[in-house]
Amino acid sequence: MPRVYVETYGCQMNVADTELILGLLGRDGYVPAEQPEGADVILVNTCAVRDHAERRVIGRVGELKRYKRPGDVLGVVGCMAQRLGTTLLESTPHVDLVVGPDGYRGLPELIAAARAGERTADVAFKGWEHYEDVDPARPGSGPSAFVTVQRGCDYRCTFCVVPMTRGPERSRKLEGVLREVEGLAANGVTEVTLLGQTVNSYHDGRFDFADLLRAVGGVAGVRRVRFTSPHPNDFSDRVIGAMAEVPAVCEHVHLPVQSGSSRVLRRMLRRYTREQYLDCVARLRRAVPGIALTTDIIVGFPGETEADFAETESLVREVGFDDAYTFKYSPRDGTAALKIRDHVPDGVAGERLERLIVTVRDVARRRNIRLVGSTHEVLVEKPARRGELLQTRTRTNKVVLLQGPAEWIGSYRMVRFTGTTGATFTATPVLAARELAVVG
């Protein structure tokens, strides 16, 4: 049987798309390969959000060509493939095919053409494509699974290439999502993460994201529901109400802010001000006590002054984020931000990034220290990289290292936090009230 190796870069959407690709090719007789050596088809699933990610992928594709044998296929798929299209074929002669996120259905035919010596690309947007009839292959996914509910984005943030790489926003029918989740639950999945570029703007023409949360949270066997990434503008009262009322919805939101300065936010075309973002934070915290908030922040956006950056630092302290993904602004071809003057020198942006990381870590460490000694439910995910420990996760998305047998993987445990590095926790098991009742 032909073997396919897929190497994945980027966000959770790309991870889910890799599972989709494996499911599609599995219907054509392909089996997954753990390593590129000996694979008949090698695919690199790519990210295009930052220039560094693209350069890293180009270098990796150059390394992977050494595994190609006569008749083998090396392809680039995903967002970078969509952005570069046929120019990628022209610049990298060892690449045989280039396929964007809407072209995966044609992969078996494109691979066959590549094997026959035809170098091809499919980067057409297909607004109807949801891959509803494709069962993703989730090898070793364990108790957790990603479920894509929305593709594309209708926002036009001036720094972002997603609308150019993922196309316009479209949502799957709620019934289709529900069928997929019910199938996962029947196979032992207890934690589901709903994926979309602006996931809380989900609307299938009849049902909105609040309806989706209630439906997925009501599936028998589903114990936790997460979602990413939302947009601050799309947290309606209905959505926040569903988060508060559905027990399965976890007390964690990744809420990208990008900047703490309303002036910079306006240049980014984020469509909210600093005050409106803080109001969204307050509404979430009123409705969901103890909610954990993480975020994305860009520094060095064109025109950002030291005063603008100071507003970002002060917002981090005011919100008290549990964590943040921080980046220097990365110019992207085709984005409106390229037309904005007053680009920030790279050295200045780098120095601001270093300061921001210190601030984020200090805020997160202070929050985490206060949690030492408290008790939480964790899902045991997998063996930890360190020693004989297990990696677990709380409902608030805190990573916790725990000593215990491998048989615990996939189960839920009550633990008490015994320490923190500032980012992760150590813990010991404790008996839940129901377990104590049984023991008594």
Image (cartoon, rainbow, N blue to C red):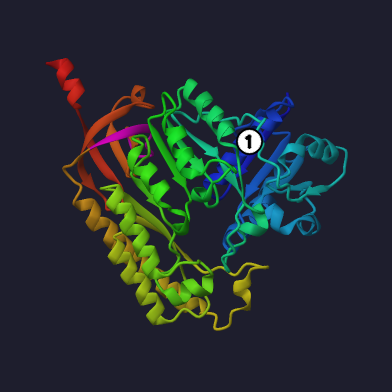
Location of the N terminus (image quadrant): top right
Give percent across and percent down for residue 332: 62, 67
Pick the front one: 380 or 286: 286
Quadrant hosting residue 6: top right
Give percent across and percent down for residue 183: 53, 24
What element does badge 1 sit on?
Answer: helix
Location of the C terminus (image quadrant): top left
Give percent across and percent down for residue 170: 62, 47
Task: Determine whether, in the image, residue 279 is placed left or right of residue 128.
Answer: left
Residue 34 vertical position relative to residue 350 in the rendered view, above or below: above
Residue 335 vertical position relative to residue 41 in the rendered view, above or below: below
Q: Amino acid at mark 1?
A: Leu
Q: Is residue 162 magenta?
A: no
Q: Is residue 384 magenta?
A: yes
Pick the front one: 380 or 317: 317
Quadrant hosting residue 226: top left
Pick the front one: 200 or 236: 236
Magenta-drawn segment: 376-387
The answer to whether one can see residue 21 in this image is: yes
The answer to whether one can see residue 36 in this image is: no
Q: Which residue is mark 1?
A: 20
The residue positioned 79% from the left and 46% from the top of the image is 96
Task: Determine whether, in the image, residue 98 is placed left or right of residue 272.
Answer: right
Task: Determine whether, in the image, residue 185 is placed left or right of residue 281.
Answer: right
The residue positioned 63% from the left and 54% from the top of the image is 57
Pick the front one: 141 or 224: 224
